[in-house]
Image (cartoon, coloured by chain):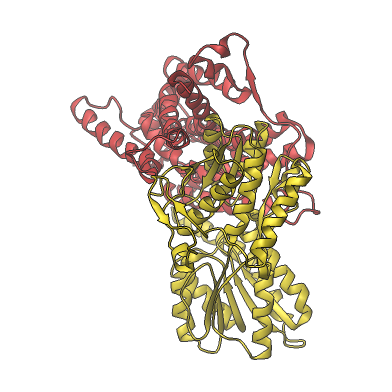
Chain colours: A yellow, B red
Amino acid sequence: MKKGIVLLLIVLLVSSFAFAQGSKEAASSAKADAPMKVGVIYISPPGDMGYSYMHDQGTIAMEKHFGDKIQVIRMEGIPENESSERVMENLIDEGCKVIFANSYNYQQYMLNVAQRYPNVYFEHCSGYLANDNMSNYFGRMYQMRYLSGMIAAKMSPTGKLGYVGAYNTPEVVRGINAFALGARAINPKATVTVVWTNTWYDPSLERQGAIALLDQGADVIAQHQDTTEPAKAAIERGKYAIGYNADFRGMIGDDRVLVSPMWNWGNYMIPAVQSALDGTWKSQSYWGGLEDEMIHLSPISPLVPADFVKQVEAKQAEIHDGKWDVFWGALKDNTGAVRQNAGQKMSDEAMLTMDWFVEGVIGKVN
Amino acid sequence: MNLLDFITRLLAATLAMGTSLTYATLGEVYTEKTGILNLGMEGTMLMGALAGFATAFNTGNLLLALIMAMLVGALLSLIHAFLCITMRANQVVAGLAITMFGTGLANFLGQRLGPATNNFNLTGMNIANKFSNIAIPGLSDIPIIGALFDVSLLTYALYIILPFSWFFMYKTKYGMVVRAVGENPRTAAAMGISVTKIRYLYTLIGGMFAGLGGACLSLSFIPSWNEGMTGGKGWIVIALVIFSTWNPGRVIIGTLVFGGITSLQFSLQAAGLKMVIPSQFLGFSPYLITLVVLTAMTIINQKKKGSFASPSALGVSFAIDDK
């Protein structure tokens, strides 16, 4: 019994040395020309090939842009609880001047730390809390969801679209609504059936959700999930898929992935770090859209007719130029109740708290 | 879509997902039957999934992939066996350590066993061959039952392995030895059975099955490698062993019920049915059922002594010179 515990401790000790080595190397190379240190906290490992992967692409772009002017310390797979405060404090101990955190529930912990360390800049992705030294930032992904919905409806023979959703948060609901509005702009009879998995990241549950939709006759599968499994399930059945986060068509290597709405986090991270370097950093609540290239569409599959691609691009230009946006005009919810009259433009606040489905969505928010 | 179709597809989805659970649960039943509790299933399954996928990716040989998954599974449970049987460490602590070690190691190696051209190595890679569904002509067209005859080779193999396991455990001399070691190791030892040897052997067999269960995910159900792709299935396995009341013949009931509920929650949503039950409730219902079964079992056992009980020596270490 005792021997066993001693052995366990030895194993743990040895392995902790092995893992500690990496961070030491990073610290010792810092002194040369004193670059500014930037801490980056990810909810999942960038190996998820989805959400954190795209954040890491932004971090890589930032590293390339600044070269040896900055030094990045990455913290991967950090749980959204009190321990994230310790992680942030460790980063500050290491000398970080700017800290990014990429998931919603870090925000309260980040605010706590921000109040304790007024000389460090904090950047929180996807939340709403802010402080003199803490900003929040996100992107108008719904605009890309709308465009991908147009493409899905164009390519769907039956108009039955499926959507694998993670959690019923306003962000996901907004995306589903935008997707459905885009689809019904092309095919007024199109429907979007929603399956909730209640997880951001679980390859087998995500796949099962997609399979259930395919079993019910959906012929395009869209997703708000972190892995490529829903898309793969659709491709394996010879149906179409819409990716998310990264370019799934390239990853899966199949043209039946019609398009993927993508993030471009570097476009926010680079100016934010630049302002910190210049000493002009200001707290803000940033919700960037197409005009800032925070979001974009992956290259569209060659299976989509070229003249239709032009139609999508025209719509994209309208959004880009601010002539039109997704939640402008008359809107009904999926029980038939009028939610917005013609000529009205939905406020950011209404979008950020959206808890109802538009007409054509089959499913329940709760 | 008519109801028959709905049920047939539900069963097909359940079998596809349940195969992995069934192998791992069967493995844990074998291990627990000898009195060793292995909570390391989650880590063992994940290592099995990685070993299987990495082998299939690098060699394209599915048989070799299965063998590697079983070997790696056995290797991890060898550590568990050494800690629990030879060192007589606390089985719960050792099992938890195996899970943490296994999941960490699998995620670490998953970024190193593939082609260097890809940023994240094995994640997102495809394999040339996988265990696809094979339909038996005629049989697979029958409503409902047909789903049983349109599955992968890994599932077909279960149709033989499960009845055999029951027969082995309850109708053969070897099975009796296993049960004796788990029920009363002292008596078994007095009869000249090497308790240590039997416990080692069945802990390894359990690990092999767990590795195989993981490989079912990465070679058939989700033919790819994703970090943490077992998503807690190793813990459901521990519950399923209780559900099966340590009887290999009943393992399939548990996996069908559990797999079925998971599939049903998606099928109901996808069918657009106005659900009375919220999806979150269906999500945790497998665990709720475990609690109900556990309670029911305890009550039945009190009335009809011992019919559904766990192996008496489960979790207790044994040495011949103990008093």
Q: Nearer the viewer, residue B63 or A177?
A: A177
Residue A234's place in the image compared with A351, above or below, is: above
Q: Nearer the viewer, residue A309 or B191?
A: A309
- Taking the view exactly as shown, the residue that stands out farthest to the front is A343
Which of the 4 image quadrants contains residue B307? top left
Could you tell whether B240 is left or right of A177 in the image? left
Give the residue drawn at x 50%, y 52%.
Answer: B97
- Taking the view exactly as shown, the residue that stands out farthest to the left is B303
Give the residue drawn at x 62%, y 13%.
Answer: B136
x, y percent for residue A182: 59, 49
Residue B319's place in the image compared with B27, above or below, is: below
- Taking the view exactly as shown, the residue that stands out farthest to the right is B117
Residue A156's place in the image compared with A336, above or below, is: above
Could you tell whether A241 is left or right of B170 in the image? right
The count of marks equals: 0
Quadrant of the rendering where the C terminus of chain B is positioned: top left
Give the residue drawn at x 52%, y 79%.
Answer: A89
Which of the 4 image quadrants contains residue B71? top right
x, y percent for residue A356: 41, 52
x, y percent for residue A199: 49, 50
One can see residue B76 in this view? no
One can see residue A276 in this view? yes
x, y percent for residue B204: 56, 35
